[in-house]
Image (tube, rainbow, N blue to C red):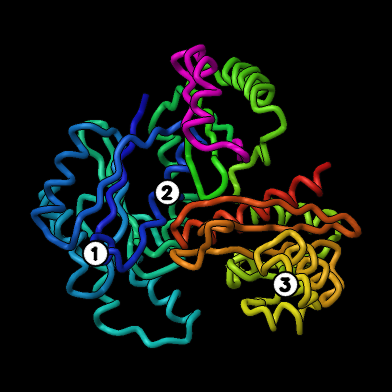
Amino acid sequence: MLNVEIITIGDELLIGQVIDTNSAWMATELNKVGLDVRYKTTVGDNEADILDAFDRAFSRASIILVTGGIGPTKDDITQKTLCKYFDTRLVFDETILQTIENVFAGLSKTLNELTRRQAYVPEKAVVIQNQMGTAPITWFERAGKILVSMPGVPYEMKWAMTTEIIPRLQEYFTISDAIRHQTFWVKNYTESLLAMCLEEFENELPAHIKLAYLPTSGLIRLRLTGRSADAESLAFEMAGQREKLLALLDGNVVSENEESPELILDKILKQNGLTLSVAESCTGGKLASLFTAIPGCSQYFKGGVVSYSNDAKSDILNVNLWDINQYGAVSCEVAEQMVRGAQNIFHSDCAIATTGIAGPDGGTPEKPVGTVWIAVAYRDLIVSRKFQFSKNRENNILRACNNGLAILMELLQD
């Protein structure tokens, strides 16, 4: 099978100042056309390190995709390093300059000398016009292998991959194998318990189908991956394994979609014309932020209340103070009044409420750190559940959010 190595270049990636999202997106798109990403390498803005990365990549991959380090500033050294590696030189390309000028004309900006220098490209490369920016895209061939250098700016890279690079790779290579993924979001299991439950299932899988565990806070994402030269046969096999897995998990699959739980709910709420609000204590606004990060959420998300104090629970959400004193702020009674209060304030069809002890301190023997009550409402129906999470504050917040989302999905899918 053809294999791919992705090389990302930039000191900012190594020190954690910028998170590499490019390689994850690229791997997903490459898998769709049967190209297998076997290696990912990140190097800084250092010529010797980049040359070494190129050597290692050519020794083990058929396709090397490079992003970053081709801007107008002094630390952008990828083009010069490519010239050294392929024993060539930078030459002026009038067509590239015209493309850059067109980009600047659309932005109503003045082209400066540093940006004009990006019209110099490696002489031995096939140059691909970058219609989304100023940094050129270059394609090199060596002994039947391909190296492509692209901008690190995500929207420029995505345009290049979608419109130019993947179509060219499909023309250049004969891609024989199909790759198929199937994802399952699973609730009510720890990773170890799920592994025990699925041990026999995993042992019986054919060699070309594998199961991976991808835990996230409160849920586990299972991924079945199959590879075969026979795409039709693989699809049939994957469907059969899916049925076996669903039977074993017995209603604990929240979704069969690669998307995150909040994105899945986004679609469900939009499709059904339902509205949503939240009332948060221990999650402190995190739940609301999951939705407000999604474009178009204003179609259904009405708003939220962060009622951290007991007074806020009482004054804003109309939680009975006697119940707070009698049962505690972290209780079924308070969670259910919070969720109903959110529904009433925002006139929403659905609501999620969280109240708990996120930690690392504040617990008691009766209610230790990690105790969380979640209440979810769908019209007149309310479902409330108690959870006992860990002592880690961040993990407890995320688990509370994900479990609230999972409960609402249950109610809407029943």
- Between marks 3 and 2, how big is the CA–CA gap? 46 Å
Kindly identify which residue carries mark 2: 24
Q: Nearer the viewer, mark 1 or mark 3?
A: 3
Q: Is residue 411 visible?
A: yes
Magenta highlight on residue 194: yes
* Label 1: few (<14), some (14–19) or many (≥20) C-alpha neighbours in 10 Å: few
Q: Secondary structure at mark 2?
A: helix
Image coords of residue 124 (percent x, y): 20, 50
Instruction: Say what amino acid the circle numbered 1 marks.
Output: Ile
Determine the image quadrant of residue 303. Answer: bottom right
**Disc 3 or 2, which lies upstream in sequence?**
2
Near-viewer residue (359 or 232): 359
Residue 324, numbered label: 3
Q: Is residue 87 above or below residue 285?
A: above
**Disc 1 or 2, which lies upstream in sequence?**
1
Q: Quadrant of the C terminus?
A: top right
Instruction: Say what amino acid the circle numbered 2 marks.
Output: Ala
* Label 2: few (<14), some (14–19) or many (≥20) C-alpha neighbours in 10 Å: few
Image coords of residue 231 (percent x, y): 56, 21
Q: Quadrant of the N terminus?
A: top left
Near-viewer residue (306 or 101): 306
Kindly identify which residue carries mark 1: 15
Asked if marks 1 and 2 touch (Cβ < 8 Å), the reply is: no
Instruction: Say what amino acid the circle numbered 3 marks.
Output: Ile
Q: Nearer the viewer, mark 1 or mark 2?
A: 1
Q: Which residues are magenta?
A: 184-212
- Between marks 1 and 2, how big is the CA–CA gap? 18 Å
Q: Residue at x 31, y 56 (%)?
A: 67
Q: Is residue 96 above or below residue 239?
A: below
Residue 156 as seen in the image, left or right of residue 308: left
